[in-house]
């Protein structure tokens, strides 16, 4: 008896996406090797590292990374349609070895992006994989759009947060979907500590802006130190910029995911419990990866039973 062709659909979810690392490693340790890998946003990044054979290197970096390592990747530029340009993240991927042409990889791979002009879903199946990932992670309001083939592309989570349909189009017969947005709606706003005026370097420990400032060049540190409190908290009773952005994205992606999965159901949905992980809390890699591993281990008996059937 031959096993079915297995597809892995890795969903969007920003910092929660480190859990995809634990999911993939759990599958591999159980002897389940996906034949097709498709990802949206952070799912494209982690899936791309896997198909390039660099998942272990990405895991090591994510588990050890603090804001001192993360901040230099956030090349703030307010003139490109987003807060972050994204070119340093692409350089990081190249340094990690995630830069091969997609068509040369041993496993079929696609990254999902959105055409900013038409709203069409774009499946990137060829060309440098780091270019494809850069387009797929271009979250509106955070990352600048990516230019590709004469089009401006943004985050694929706007149209297909969990790309089950892409796996199916690639010939997958058994699809495992990882949904990072299943328990986020209703998440309470997180109140940040404001920075003292003119003294950003003295911010209270735990402030998101203080962590971002750590390790930045002096000029950029001063700019972010002045703008940070305004972006994070507008008043004692008003959600800040990142509160509104993060919760709006959560609502949108939850609704789109529910609709897409109802019309295109996978065989198994894996739901890591990551409700308390914020949009940009990439420094929590170790615990997020561990939750991904726990979620796939809980799903493995069902997966194995269905594959054998």
Image: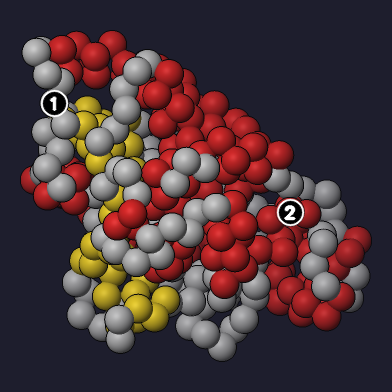
> Of label 1 and label 2, which has the lower sequence position?
1
Label 2 CA crowd tier, 10 Å (few <14, some 14–19, many 20+): some
Residue 295 versus residue 227 in the image, above or below? above
> What colouring method underlies this structural image?
secondary structure
33 lies left or right of 216: left
Reading the image, the residue beneath label 1 is: 4
Reading the image, the residue beneath label 2 is: 69
Q: Residue at x 83, y 49 (%)?
A: 205
| Image quarter (top left, top right, bottom left or bottom right) of the C terminus | top left
- How far separated are the C-alphas under marks 1 and 2? 41 Å
Residue 213 appears at what percent x and percent y? 79, 64
Q: Is residue 153 visible?
A: yes
Residue 109 appears at what percent x and percent y? 29, 50
The disc label shown at residue 131, or none: none
Residue 282 versus residue 34 in the image, above or below? below
11 lies left or right of 140: left
Q: Residue at x 71, y 76 (%)?
A: 227
Front residue of this view, candidates 20 and 129: 129
- The residue tagged with tag 1: helix, strand or loop? loop
33 lies left or right of 232: left
- Which tag is nearer the camera, tag 1 or tag 2? 1
- The residue tagged with tag 2: helix, strand or loop? helix
Residue 237 appears at what percent x and percent y? 59, 61
Front residue of this view, candidates 230 and 250: 250
**Mark 1 vs 2: CB contact within 8 A:** no
Q: Residue at x 15, y 21 (%)?
A: 3
Q: Residue at x 37, y 16 (%)?
A: 30
Label 1 CA crowd tier, 10 Å (few <14, some 14–19, many 20+): some
């Amino acid at each position: 008896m031959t096993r079915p062709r297995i597809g892995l659909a890795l969903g969007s979810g920003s910092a929660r996406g480190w859990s995809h690392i634990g999911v993939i490693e759990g599958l591999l340790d159980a002897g389940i090797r996906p034949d097709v890998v498709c990802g949206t946003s952070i799912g494209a990044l982690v899936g791309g590292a896997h198909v390039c054979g660099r998942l272990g290197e990405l895991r090591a970096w994510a588990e050890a990374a603090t804001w001192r390592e993360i901040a230099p990747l956030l090349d703030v530029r307010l003139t490109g349609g987003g807060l972050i340009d994204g070119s340093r993240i692409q350089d990081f991927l190249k340094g990690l070895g995630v830069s091969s042409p997609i068509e040369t990889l041993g496993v079929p791979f696609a990254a999902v992006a959105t055409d900013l002009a038409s709203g069409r879903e774009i499946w990137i199946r060829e060309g440098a994989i780091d270019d494809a990932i850069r387009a797929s992670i271009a979250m509106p309001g955070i990352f600048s759009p990516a230019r590709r083939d004469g089009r401006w592309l943004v985050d694929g989570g706007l149209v297909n947060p969990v790309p089950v349909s892409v796996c199916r189009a690639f010939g997958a017969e058994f699809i495992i979907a990882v949904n990072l947005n299943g328990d986020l709606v209703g998440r309470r706003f997180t109140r940040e500590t404001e920075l003292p005026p003119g003294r950003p370097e003295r911010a209270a420990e735990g402030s998101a802006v203080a962590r971002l400032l750590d390790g930045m060049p002096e000029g950029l540190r001063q700019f972010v130190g002045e703008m940070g409190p305004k972006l994070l908290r507008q008043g004692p009773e008003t959600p800040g910029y990142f509160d509104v952005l993060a919760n709006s994205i959560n609502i949108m992606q939850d609704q789109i995911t529910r609709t897409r999965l109802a019309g295109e159901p996978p065989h198994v949905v894996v739901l890591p419990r990551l409700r308390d992980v914020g949009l940009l809390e990439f420094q929590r890699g170790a615990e997020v990866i561990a939750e991904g591993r726990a979620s796939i281990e809980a799903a493995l008996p069902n997966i194995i039973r269905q594959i054998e059937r």
